[in-house]
Image (tube, rainbow, N blue to C red):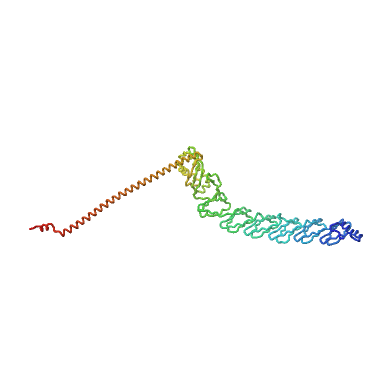
Amino acid sequence: NKPSTTQDNTTAWTKIQMGAGNSLMIRIFGFVAAQEDEQILVKSLTTTRVFNGPCLKWVAPLNSSTTRKAIPLGELEYLIVTNTLTGEKRVEQGPKQVFLGSHDADEGVKTAISLNARQFVRFLDNRTGKVRVILGEAGCVVPGPYEKIKDNEGVLQAIDLKNHEYIRVENKRDGTQKIAKGEQLLFLGPYEERVGAKAQAIEIDAETAVLVRNKRSGQQRLVTEQQIFVPHVDEEVLKVQKLIKLADYEGCIVRGQDGEDKYFYGSNPQHRSFFIPPYSEMVELVWSRGRRRERRDLKLQKLDLRPFYMSFEFNTHTKDNVELILEGSFFWEIVDLPSMVRMTGDTTGDVCNHARSKFIEAVSKVTLQEFMQVFNKIAADVHKLDDSFYADRGVKIHSLEVTSYRCADDSTARILQQIIQETTNRMNKLQQQESANEVALQQMAGEIEQEQSKGALIQARIANSEQTAKMEGIAEGERLNSFLATTATQIPDIASRLVCSDPS
């Protein structure tokens, strides 16, 4: 019988003795058989040898033997084998069966790396320190016996750069950097590492510019030439600027490297549109806002130089110690921007606070009743009698109006409402009486005008009657004259009538 492939020489000898006819010969000679996928490891007192199957080997009585399976490797598998005597390593790559040497030890079957067209892998040789790069679609990729994958991520993806993208790459061996521009599929070199993420190239047009700084010299430059801009390897993008456009009524301030402020106005054709030069910045003003100017968080870079309204609200006391809450509005404008910037950093806060102090001073001199009668005059005097304060700050107050007022105390407010109601009722009654008087005056004027018209009618009738009588008299006289003229020719004169009448 064939000895078992998993037993040592002693076991094989026993089984052959039990099953063979020529027992004397088998007692003297021990044989071990190996299949095609097996090998026999024979250890003597001084050496170790292997015999790959298929084979039948005789093993001396003082030697030991074992059989072991060959290691099958598939098409995508490999094996790292180490010679335990010399320490040398080798790689066995499938597909095949691997028969280990007498002093070989394996590290286990491993799967080879398969790369697609967008992948790559980098191997670091621990013995030489060299880095080997294998790009995608290179078939079955197997590391060398002393190589390991360099990157923690293992297989790396190539960097897909579109035509408007770029990335900064650093060579870790010599510290140099380069800019890789799209459109391309970027595979990193042996010692290259990406610095940061992919960045978008900047489209510079008529309304876009780029401020860049050279990291070697520290100099800044403003790129305005129209292009798809990618910075040089020594440059970094500080800011992408949009063209600043000013309307006719707008203004702004640009502070240069020397700290000097330059003023730009939309009314000046040369200032209507511009880019901020290198080492310069737009000055941002921070003003107070709210009806009481309690929050200073209104940030402005472009200033509206047109007149506009600004509301306010604050508390004050009258001479008779009535606390009032005044509400009103300014109608104002900026007329001298440099003076405003030179004198104040919070224009709205200064204007409202100054007006409040003046209101408090003026209202404290009058009683509530007097205030109700002259509050509009007080509002006018507050800014007209103190125009220098506003003029020094480049501001012109066109009007200052109190739109409403109320008492801070509820009981006083009720009394004030009663006073206001009584005043309103009285004014309404006066208005009604004035309306009635106007109606009566109009009625009287109508009657007078009617009587005057009647007198004129009578005079006209009299004059007409006189004229009619006069015309009738003239007509009657004309008829008599005509009659007398006719009778003068037809009737003899009186002397003739007397002669004719004498009988003798």
**What is the x, y in percent for residue 374?**
45, 42
Determine whether, in the image, residue 319 is placed left or right of residue 133. left
The answer to whether 280 appears left or right of 171 in the picture is left
Where's residue 477, x and y in %?
21, 55
Residue 94: x %, y % from top left: 77, 61
Residue located farthest toward the top when viewing the structure as drawn: 320
99 horizontally vs 153: left or right = right
Name the residue at the left extreme.
504
Q: Position of residue 242 (x, y in %)?
A: 57, 54
Please tell me which residue lies in front, 282 or 443: 443
Q: Is residue 318 left or right of residue 31?
A: left
At x 21% / y 55%, what residue is drawn?
476
Q: Quadrant of the N terminus?
A: bottom right
Which picture quadrant has residue 106? Answer: bottom right
Q: Nearer the viewer, residue 75 or 142?
A: 75
Residue 358 in view in this figure: no
